[in-house]
Image (tube, coloured by chain):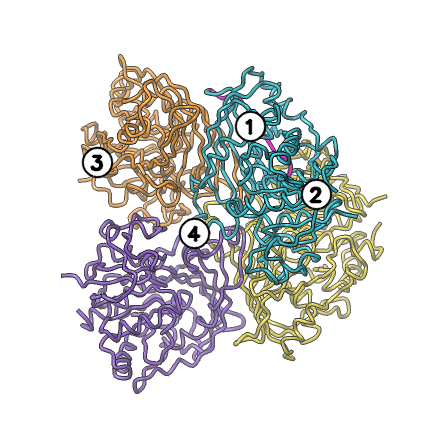
Chain colours: A purple, B yellow, C cyan, D orange
Amino acid sequence: MKVRVAVLGATGTVGQRFIQLLDGHPWFEVAAVVGSERSAGRTYGEAARWVLDTPMPAPVRAMTVLGDVARLDTPLVFSALPSKTAGSIESRLASEGHIVCSNASDHRMDADVPLLIPEVNPDHLELIEVQRRRRGWTGAIVTNPNCTATGPTMALRPLHDAFGVTKLLLVSMQALSGAGYPGVPSYDAVDNVVPYIGGEEPKVETEPQKMLGAVRDGAIEPAPFVISAHCNRVPVLEGHLICMSVSFARRPILDELTATLRGWRALPQELNLPSAPPQPIIVRDEPERPQTRRDRDAGRGMSTTVGRVRECPILDYKFVCLSHNTIRGAAGGSLLNAELMYAQGMFR
Amino acid sequence: MKVRVAVLGATGTVGQRFIQLLDGHPWFEVAAVVGSERSAGRTYGEAARWVLDTPMPAPVRAMTVLGDVARLDTPLVFSALPSKTAGSIESRLASEGHIVCSNASDHRMDADVPLLIPEVNPDHLELIEVQRRRRGWTGAIVTNPNCTATGPTMALRPLHDAFGVTKLLLVSMQALSGAGYPGVPSYDAVDNVVPYIGGEEPKVETEPQKMLGAVRDGAIEPAPFVISAHCNRVPVLEGHLICMSVSFARRPILDELTATLRGWRALPQELNLPSAPPQPIIVRDEPERPQTRRDRDAGRGMSTTVGRVRECPILDYKFVCLSHNTIRGAAGGSLLNAELMYAQGMFR
Amino acid sequence: MKVRVAVLGATGTVGQRFIQLLDGHPWFEVAAVVGSERSAGRTYGEAARWVLDTPMPAPVRAMTVLGDVARLDTPLVFSALPSKTAGSIESRLASEGHIVCSNASDHRMDADVPLLIPEVNPDHLELIEVQRRRRGWTGAIVTNPNCTATGPTMALRPLHDAFGVTKLLLVSMQALSGAGYPGVPSYDAVDNVVPYIGGEEPKVETEPQKMLGAVRDGAIEPAPFVISAHCNRVPVLEGHLICMSVSFARRPILDELTATLRGWRALPQELNLPSAPPQPIIVRDEPERPQTRRDRDAGRGMSTTVGRVRECPILDYKFVCLSHNTIRGAAGGSLLNAELMYAQGMFR
Amino acid sequence: MKVRVAVLGATGTVGQRFIQLLDGHPWFEVAAVVGSERSAGRTYGEAARWVLDTPMPAPVRAMTVLGDVARLDTPLVFSALPSKTAGSIESRLASEGHIVCSNASDHRMDADVPLLIPEVNPDHLELIEVQRRRRGWTGAIVTNPNCTATGPTMALRPLHDAFGVTKLLLVSMQALSGAGYPGVPSYDAVDNVVPYIGGEEPKVETEPQKMLGAVRDGAIEPAPFVISAHCNRVPVLEGHLICMSVSFARRPILDELTATLRGWRALPQELNLPSAPPQPIIVRDEPERPQTRRDRDAGRGMSTTVGRVRECPILDYKFVCLSHNTIRGAAGGSLLNAELMYAQGMFR
């Protein structure tokens, strides 16, 4: 018997990724799809303008899209709702006993809501008790970070543990899919770089510190380092490539740094979660890798690929980091969060 | 009577830009085109696979391509030769009395060769006397910088004068045309970012200090700041967009910084050189500008556009800087160098 | 004294092209810009999200956008309104005495409305008398054809006159700009071809016959040939490239056909209209031309470029035809229509 | 025990596709990789600049590249050699007893060489006897068609059987990968269409008639219809999209035509060959499908997708046809040929 799940915002691009990644999942099965009022009552096949490159899964195609969450009875809910809309709906569902794994930004920085990457901070799930106690909920909300914060945070986890990160300057080259659908007009995208993404830099400059922070007395003490982010949109379909310069409390030698990244394994790998990549961080030695198109699907889109590790004349080291923004950085990240909670018996 | 000029490497992409920019030039006219042995003896129209978006200028189309520089008699020579090849040919021509304005990297870091951006360091032309004395030449070599170093160096000139640059961390998103023709295979370019450009970062990390250095006793004392560069190839045709974080000896307030950039005028503007843009640095206030495609042609490809000026949590300020890589960063830069020398009576 | 003109739909992409092309026009000057209710009352600089690659013309930037046409007093009005909206507004303006040059499709196939390309069917302006008589108007509506119909119709004019076109099969590869702004989502455009453009094929299969038809007794007798069109969207910014196979009543030899295209000059060239290209049809001999990016700007975007003329094993001849879709195929076409009417004294 | 195979031209793009598709193949295993003299003696991992988006298969990475075919002992050889080079090498191998499945064009139109698509003309394998008798070979050469001819020929097979094709006019929009690597320079590809591919149209206008021809007395009588092809290069990575207009001896009604395409199954499906797609032709009903990026991988790149079936005002019907050019149109096609021969006991 698989766990029945609902997908909110199911017709959007992140919603579609949830549907795609849940197709044939060993533990979960899609039991409800929730969309806008306009979609309500139509089949998913009619309501969704399917934009992914694999076919729409047949079982979902025939499902009727629900227009609200009034009668949701699935223990697990994935939220691909747009920010602003997401907050209150997710709260309501958590209060009604649902486990809500959300890709929306609304609750990410709430003091009692885990901002979770299972390899990075599985212990932050402790916050759920605080969350329930404080809010009187029987369910819970767990969020995954902004797509651009995800890869760097994964790369920093083992480095922070070993050497203590003090500064991070990053410049992103982000994919078009990150803006959703219809998202970036093609007339803005082709033969162009747009050096601005509304609201992105503040998220990237604060979410990693929460994730790399420690839980103390039911609260998170953010990791005390500083981030400066420049975010850019470049004409690629999927995959956020990020140039990073980092300083450490204890500066390692270069081989120590790469060995630390390469050797890192974490809880999802130990637990062998269905969506966990065998290797959370892949380090490439070829000078011209990772490349966005050729490496974004590493670990079925769940690995972070690092390359060009070298000294930085200003901070300590610099390197390149690539992460799939709509898989690991959105639906896949949220799904792995749910898998971790399920494996730990937090719902059934 | 216009000054007769020769173009070396005339059939390549930078060579084509020279031909294009010299078409209808008020002071100079193309009198000789030099190519590879394979091209020698054919007309330029036959030998050049013209790749630019404007038509090949009619007068050059019919010229016979020369296979070597043996009998060049033009006072002025523009060199679009590939590095390695360029060095000895340019030296020979200078020794024979030609003024050589070169886009090649071979002589850029020679102690007695000006690495020139007319707005930035026109006083470096003093080195020519040293060069002639030391080498016994009657001509001279003057070089322009690497395309990726050009825009940032222009932006730094007024800032360095006013506030003293101490650190520069930059991440480039460079155009495909920078690799010449055939250059980057399309199968590597479409839907991809390649985070590596062979040999680029060392140039970008050293050329600006030479240009912003001071001439003392016939030698250049490089400006004493540190640069860290990450260079990336993105799928755009023309225009290098660069994210910069900068620190200063005396940290200005933000308005001071933008006013300094905006108000800057330099010698080429005073002299009203034919290729000088009215405004060397354009500062945009809209959050999403400059954009590669929409701003690369500012000042007919000769202006540098700066935008998104804001505080950097790690260095002092960060901003975006855009420069046309094959106009200001190559042929147009070299042409402006020649115009400056001509205006100052250094040849006729 | 220039003729004062208004632009309807001024903030959209075709509206922006009108503003761009009218900047510095020798006969016309923009006196009013009309937009949606949302834009009304704001300056054009605030209301328009300017998407073109040249700067917004300064005089228009400061104009206040009008929300309706209630008090328009310009003799000439350019309409870049969306279809459906355009029809009644244009009729109203014509009834009030304005000359309306429209890019919208609503009135194109009206029996008494000229569907005009000045090189192709300037005599169709005779219909204006019919139009005025029938409708009781003091002004008039003149339309320009669909962007995809434009290039082929120009190429067919001299061929039809000389050899009698009987069949035309065409396959278009159309630019992203043809869909307006925001238009095609980049997630649909990059690394993709979409073989469908809603409503396009019926227009392309009927408009050319009207334009190549003869005026008889105040009505147009359409040219009696058949067209089959396949319309595709490809990832290019501007320029519709079209593969055409054509049959003739009298099959010419190949040289006759190319000479006919090449030698053709028409009324706008004779009258030396400001926007008329010196050569309406450019024939290229190189096998790989025309290319979309390299040839779309020929004749400042007003020429049609033809290449690869060769025999077709099924119809008589096949060739490639390129036309700039937002210049000749939209705003520039409409502007040339107005220039023809002005040159013929139809308004002042 | 799997059949040992060699790949010729193994380091090129089609060679890489062979390596990729043979990874984990149930019947065949790569035993030898042959490259240019320059690659000889190096490991495949060193010699090949791997350009595909999946990782290089580990077992092949360590193989030593052979510089010639002198000591090849594999019963089966896949040839990804460039045309001109391929001919004599393939003949030599066939004379020495190898089964050569070739993607090269050299032998395609030889009277006694099957030009094979297993779904289309499996009976053409009869020619092998003729080939052996005539040439005194113990091995054999079997070729697959040009990538652009492949999809249309698959679509025509059931139509030709049912209604008799008489005319085919097609316009292709071909992927960049079709030109190999480095292939098309990115400076020619981005924001551009090139309406010419050297040597392509003659192949597309003759190969389908051979494949749809009948074997009579040991020779092929080509199908007696006429093809006119316009071939274009568009900026997509993989997948040739083709607009087709077709006439028939007996004109079907539209539903008959689509039912014929949809219902078609052929020998590879019956035999359940490992690379055979469940459905050779997929017919899409949505007006905007197939799309290059979203449908090229249908049937793991081995299905042909047809859409927009409708009447043609000039020929009988028109539709769109999409086929993956480096899978079904090259390495995958050749592999399926080998699978068919193996299943029929032609080698072991």
Q: Amino acid at mark 1?
A: Arg
> Which residue is tagged 4?
C187
Residue B11 seen in render: no
Residue at disc 4, secondary structure: helix
Q: Which mark is residue C308?
A: 1
What is the x, y in percent for residue D4? 24, 38
Q: What separation in Å lies between label 4 and label 2 (alpha carbons)?
A: 38 Å
Residue at disc 3, secondary structure: loop
- Is A71 on the left or on the right of B50, as rendered? left
Q: Amino acid at mark 2?
A: Ile
Q: Are marks 1 and 2 in contact (CB under 8 Å)?
A: no
- Is residue C304 within the magenta segment? yes
> Which residue is tagged 3?
D273
Callout 1: residue from which chain?
C
Q: What separation in Å lies between label 2 and label 3 (alpha carbons)?
A: 58 Å
**Residue located 39% across and 68% down the image:** A83
Instruction: Decide which of D1, D202 is in the foreground and name it.
Output: D202
Q: Mark 1 vs mark 3: tell me if same chain.
A: no
For residue C112, above or below residue B221 = above
- Is D305 on the left or on the right of B47, as rendered? left
Mark nearest the camera among 1 and 4 is: 4
- Dot 1 crowding, Cα within 10 Å, few <14, some 14–19, many 20+: many
What is the x, y in percent for residue A115? 34, 73
Q: What separation in Å lies between label 1 and label 3 (alpha carbons)?
A: 42 Å
